[in-house]
Amino acid sequence: MAEIVLGLATSHGPMLVTEVSAWGLRLAADRAQQHPWRGRHWSFDALVGERADENLDAQSHADEQEARRRRCLTAIETLADRFAAARVDVALIVGNDQEEMFDARLTPAFALYCGATIPNHELSPARLAALPPGIDVAVPGYIPSGGADYAGAPDLACQLGAALTAAGFDIAVMHDAPKDETPHAFGFVYRHLMRDRPVPSILLLINTFYPPNQPPAARCVALGKALSAAIADWPADLRVAVIASGGLSHFVIDEALDHQVLDAILGGEAEVLGSLDEATLQSGSSEIKNWLPVARALETTALKPELIDYVPCYRSAAGTGNAMGFVAWTEMAV
């Protein structure tokens, strides 16, 4: 019988895999966009005015950014150490796609990769050139030099697909990748939490970003309960890790939202997060939905959650940036 022996949840944004000197490359996009934040859309200048009393200028100073980056790197190393110590046989990774594996022609709400090989190939020069400033320089943080092919777990993935379908979830199943590009949500896990020595894995993708078929938070929570039941039914004697990749709030940081999520997870109350307002879970903050099924699945085990760190990484007085969160579920919180 398979057993979940480890849970991990991590942010994965470009600010984690680039030097502080590159963080400002995203400021032009920050200034140009309308940002969803606390249920409304805001211009950059309006956010600066609204958040004037939060001292975000100081929090986005280069010295403070460097200190926070170092905290993030320490937290990532801690998660990687926990992964190595768990001696995992197979990992189920929950993440999202940002038109990397899919595109506007096909955007499934939930998708499961059941292939034997997971391709994470280097981007073509044309694809790389099309990436926005600040995103292009982050690519080596997700794709190793020369690219890589990782081992899937097709038999287990197909069993999981059947179980989730029986539980009432409409899952798109892939036996081959639409493109030879693994979404960075997963590439981050392979490169940093698994230190480029990945175990066989299953990719479960949630469409957090793109209307009209974004699964609501309650559906993502319910998915977690179904995942734990499906894994428990695997007949093989396997040590399983369940990993969430994404979040926390961005591209405008909302620390109140992040603490609401973290407090519920650490308190073993992921179910209540199903009532989160969908208007708050938009843009990058939508990736919080990748954490919800993992947190709910881990609540069915004896594993205990531990907050490794929470680090809001600001890049402007408007509050743009990425709040980074790192959580581990182990047999005993350290």
Image (cartoon, rainbow, N blue to C red):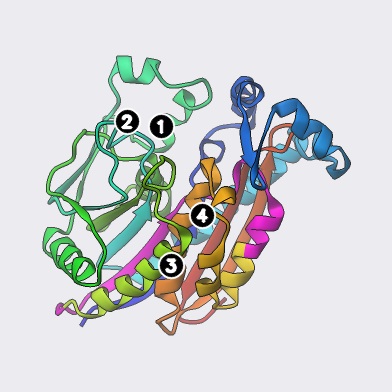
Q: Using the image, determine if residue 147 lies above or below residue 296.
A: above
Pointer 1 residue: 140
Query: Residue at the spot x=24%, y=74% of the render?
Result: 230
The disc, 2 or 4, on the residue closer to the chain's N-terminal end is 2
Residue type at mark 2?
Ser
Task: State the CA–CA distance, disc 1 to disc 3.
Answer: 32 Å
Q: Using the image, determine if residue 17 lies above or below residue 228.
A: above
Stretch of the chain drawn in magenta: 235-260
Residue type at mark 1?
Pro
Rendering coords of residue 72 (x, y %) = 60, 49
For marks 2 and 4, give the one nearer the viewer.
4
Q: Residues within 10 Å of mark 1 (few under 14, many from 20)?
A: some
Task: State the CA–CA distance, disc 2 to disc 3.
Answer: 36 Å
- Is residue 208 shown left or right of residue 26? left
- Is residue 150 shown left or right of residue 80? left
Pointer 2 residue: 145
The disc, 4 or 3, on the residue closer to the chain's N-terminal end is 3
Query: Residue at the spot x=39%, y=15% of the render?
Result: 129
Q: Residues within 10 Å of mark 2 (few under 14, many from 20)?
A: few
Asked whether the beta carbons under mark 2 and mark 1 sit within 8 Å of each other, the answer is yes
